[in-house]
Amino acid sequence: MFKKTIALVTVFSLICSTLAPAGSAHAAVEKEAGEETEESKTIRTIVSRDTGWAIVDIRTMSENIVVVSPVVGREIDFEESNRFAMFHGRNKYNKKIRLSLLNMGVPGFQSAVFLKRDGEKASVRVRFRSGPTIESRIFPLKGLEDLRMTREYIENFSEIQKGNYTIGKESKIETDAEYPKITDEIISFKQRVPKFELSTRTPGRVSLKNGDRLSGEFVPFYEDDRILLQTEFDTRRIAVDDIERLIFHGNRGSWAAREAVMGAVGGAATGALIGAFSAWQSGASAREWAVFGATFFAVAGFITGLLTGARTARGEQEYVLGPLPNQEKSKRKKSEK
């Protein structure tokens, strides 16, 4: 009896350790999905991707250039990024500095410009080489405090390396100091925010601006500003400019069922091995415990797969193309009501 108890505890422990990771991964996805910012002049459209196409929000942004320090001037160039160990990720020169900007590693770095928007919001626009082209990407900063700490880091870099200067949690630079200097120079640029990517055939329907509605399967193909929709009778090439909205059908039921079956099969195989191993350790019947383990793990895998599939699968999703309402104005209207 004692040996069987040991075997039973072993099996249940392994089951619990198998089920544990599912919740944490989902929580991380929810946290990431919630991170959005308010921007104006946003247009939702379709752009090409290597594996198909994607619906993106193209935001026109205007921000003031900030000179963080006279040492580097308007921008940080390639030579300065090497001199101050910036935009190369954490390394021996900056590993002890509590500045999130130094976590940033940008392959193909060319230059960086610091920017400020309304309020305390700040960011850095990095230009980098991607193949034969030069591209830009915006990285948000924690606020103006990050700009002051960046100035402090640059101007005391040599002393920091010698161990004679330490940057604390808050910058020693006064809030009314001349630098970082917010200039009157404004730059405008477009930022793409992906909302939905189509890389496999997906059932759905499309509403056109002329009132027509088509149903079928969206095909991951984009050419000449047109997408493909496989209808019941033929394949339609639809111009993006003619589209009013797209609706992608949900897949909760089929996805959950597939995950449940895969979880049950994998669980049964794993359970049989664990049951046989537990029986070998305790001297019990290998066949009996292999069946026991396979049954328990199959049930656990089925339930876990069902829950995971239902949780991660998407429901029906609708996207309206064209200019989006200004979020700032929408919030003001709601508050006035």
Image (cartoon, rainbow, N blue to C red):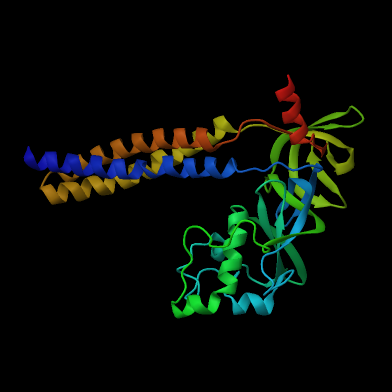
For the C terminus, the quadrant is top right
Residue occupying image coordinates x 11% and y 47% = 282
Q: In the rendered view, would you say 61 is above or below 177? A: above
- Whether residue 7 sits left or right of residue 230 in the image: it is left
- Residue 117 coordinates in the image, percent (x, y): 72, 50
Quick one: 29 or 183, which is closer to the camera? 183
147 vs 198: above or below: below
Please identify the quarter of the rendering in which residue 187 is found.
Answer: bottom right
Q: Which of 276 and 86 lies nearest the eye of the viewer? A: 86
Relative height, residue 5 to residue 158 (above, below)? above
Whether residue 136 sits left or right of residue 81 in the image: it is right
Residue, far left:
1
Q: Is residue 43 placed above or below 152 in the rendered structure?
A: above
- The percent coordinates of residue 102 (x first, y second) are 55, 66
How many numbered callouts?
0
Q: Residue at x 18, y 40 (%)?
A: 9
Q: Going 54% across and 68% down the picture, which residue do you hit?
A: 89
Q: Position of residue 6 (x, y in %)?
A: 13, 43
Question: Quadrant of the rendered structure where residue 289 is?
Answer: top left
The residue sitting at the top extreme is: 337
Residue 88 visible at all? no
Q: Position of residue 76 (x, y in %)?
A: 69, 71
In this view of the protein, which residue sits in the foreground, 153 or 261?
Answer: 153
Q: Residue at x 65, y 77 (%)?
A: 80
* Quadrant (top left, top right, bottom left, bottom right) of the N terminus: top left
* Residue 14 in view here: yes
Foreground residue among 141 and 227: 141
